[in-house]
């Protein structure tokens, strides 16, 4: 059986949908960051699949840039979550909204 681009795009759509559901349903900051990473990986899969289909390299370069942005997002986001967890002892996003003045 030959795996076509359609299979990759369907897998990417499923991964992106799971990531969106994770962001909308879960209120833990770490789970939300993992869901965002899942969505970014789905976008990378789409870039690479379409790049392979068209025979171009630009999709793979775009996926590389997305991975760099995702790595910096994880670093900064995790540092913020750790700093907030030290002071509040909770990573719940709803409790963080109460920090306003």
Image (tube, grey):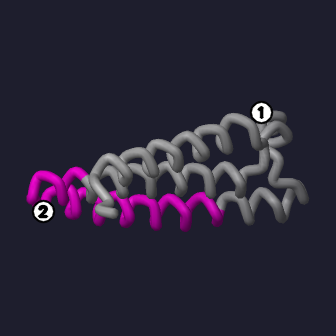
Q: Position of residue 30 (x, y in %)?
A: 71, 57
In the image, 9: left or right of 93? left
Residue 5 lies in the magenta stretch? no
What is the chief secondary structure element of the magenta stretch? helix
Q: Identify which residue is drawn at 64% across, 65% down.
A: 79
Residue furthest to the front in view is 1
User: Would you say the residues marked 2 and 1 are in contact, meaning their CB atoms lie under 8 Å apart?
Assistant: no
SS at mark 1 in the image: loop
Residue furthest to the left in view is 55
Q: Position of residue 93 (x, y in %)?
A: 77, 42
Q: Position of residue 8 (x, y in %)?
A: 36, 53
Residue 59 lies in the magenta stretch? yes
Of residues 31 and 15, the one drawn nearer to the viewer in this rendering: 15
Question: How far apart are the two marked residues, 2 and 1, measured between alpha carbons?
Answer: 46 Å
Quadrant (top left, top right, bottom left, bottom right) of the C terminus: top right
Which residue is identified by label 2?
57
Mark whose residue sits in front, 2 or 1:
2
Which residue is identified by label 1?
100
In the image, 56: left or right of 27? left
Q: Identify which residue is drawn at 78% across, 42% down.
A: 27
Q: Position of residue 82 (x, y in %)?
A: 74, 65
- The residue segment tinted magenta is 50-79
Report the number of discs.
Answer: 2
SS at mark 2 in the image: loop
Quadrant (top left, top right, bottom left, bottom right) of the N terminus: bottom left
Give the image quarter of residue 51: bottom left
Q: Identify which residue is drawn at 20% across, 63% down.
A: 61
Residue furthest to the right in view is 89
In the image, 101: left or right of 37? right
């Amino acid at each position: 059986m030959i795996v076509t681009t359609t299979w990759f795009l369907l897998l990417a759509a499923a991964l992106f949908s799971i990531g969106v559901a994770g962001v909308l349903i879960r209120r833990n900051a770490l789970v939300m960051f993992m869901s965002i990473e899942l969505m970014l990986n789905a976008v990378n899969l789409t870039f690479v699949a379409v790049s392979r289909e068209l025979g171009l390299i630009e999709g793979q370069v775009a996926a590389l840039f997305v991975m760099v942005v995702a790595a910096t997002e994880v670093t900064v986001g995790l540092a913020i979550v750790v700093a907030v967890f030290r002071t509040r002892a909770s990573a719940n996003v709803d409790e963080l909204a109460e920090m306003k003045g």
